Amino acid sequence: MIGEPPRSQGDLNFTLLGIPVRIHPLFWLVTAALGYAPNVGAAELLTWMVAVLLSILVHELGHAGVMRAYGLQPWITLYGMGGLTSYDPSRSSGSKGTDTLGQILISLAGPAAGFLLAAVLAAGLLLAERGGYAGYLLFASPFRLRPYVIGLANLRLGQFLNDLFFICTLWGLVNLLPIYPLDGGHISREILLRFFGRRGIRLSLMLSIVVAGLMAVYGIVKWHDWFLALLFGYFAYSSYATLQAYAGRDF
């Protein structure tokens, strides 16, 4: 549904832990747009962008690590819709990473890596508090686990940890929703394919439409967030368009 973007002259390419990484220019643009507000300064916006970059890289490295454990050769692309970890299917012959369990574990590994990073941050703050550095965790709603570090001269560190914790937890939970192209959408597809055969693809798309539609409505009614509503509305439409492409096929 949403594939890897074509290469551009503005791409940033490097290798991380032996895994090729490409950052498309739209990644920076969308990340900046998400963090922008009239009262946000340049330093605060830059801190947000670094936190997004780190959290998404950790997420994608989770996917890539499990892929490599299955003998696959992954690469990571960061682009306007977030991150994408891919591998060459033509070189996956004989790998158990392509079966149902393998695909589910690969999909789960991304959010799990983010949750692990959040747990490390939380543990670090608790240890800092016990060590007299006045670190503590404040749990705020909805689902926004916000760490603060006080008693430090550099207040920007507190904002960075807050942004990083927020992205790893809330974005990780959202990513597990059974919506295409999120990780939860891939997981629901694999499970439904296992029990219903190829008809499971249509069922997973229908589930994606319903859940994405509900999230779009929730974004407007509960959070008054039009960006969130438009994003999930797009996911619902994309799933619907994909479902229509299967019309007339024998499942």
Image: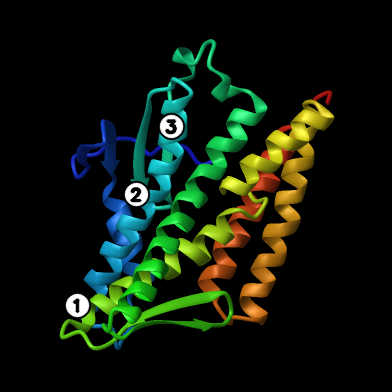
The residue where tag 1 is placed is: 42
Q: Position of residue 73 (x, y in %)?
A: 38, 23
Instruction: Report the residue that reaches farthest toward the left.
Output: 153
Residue 92: image tag: none
Element type at mark 1: helix
**Could you tell me the amino acid type at mark 2?**
Leu
Image coords of residue 196 (percent x, y)? 83, 30
Task: Determine which of the numbered discs, if any, sits on residue 86 in the image.
Answer: 3
Q: Mark 3 is on which residue type?
A: Ser
Q: Which mark is residue 57?
A: 2
Total marks placed: 3
Where is 56 relative to 219, above or below?
A: above
Q: Quadrant of residue 114?
A: bottom left
* Residue 68, percent from left and from top: 41, 27
The answer to whether residue 87 is left or right of residue 234 is left
Mark 3 or mark 2, earlier in chain: 2
In the picture, which quadrant includes the N terminus?
top right
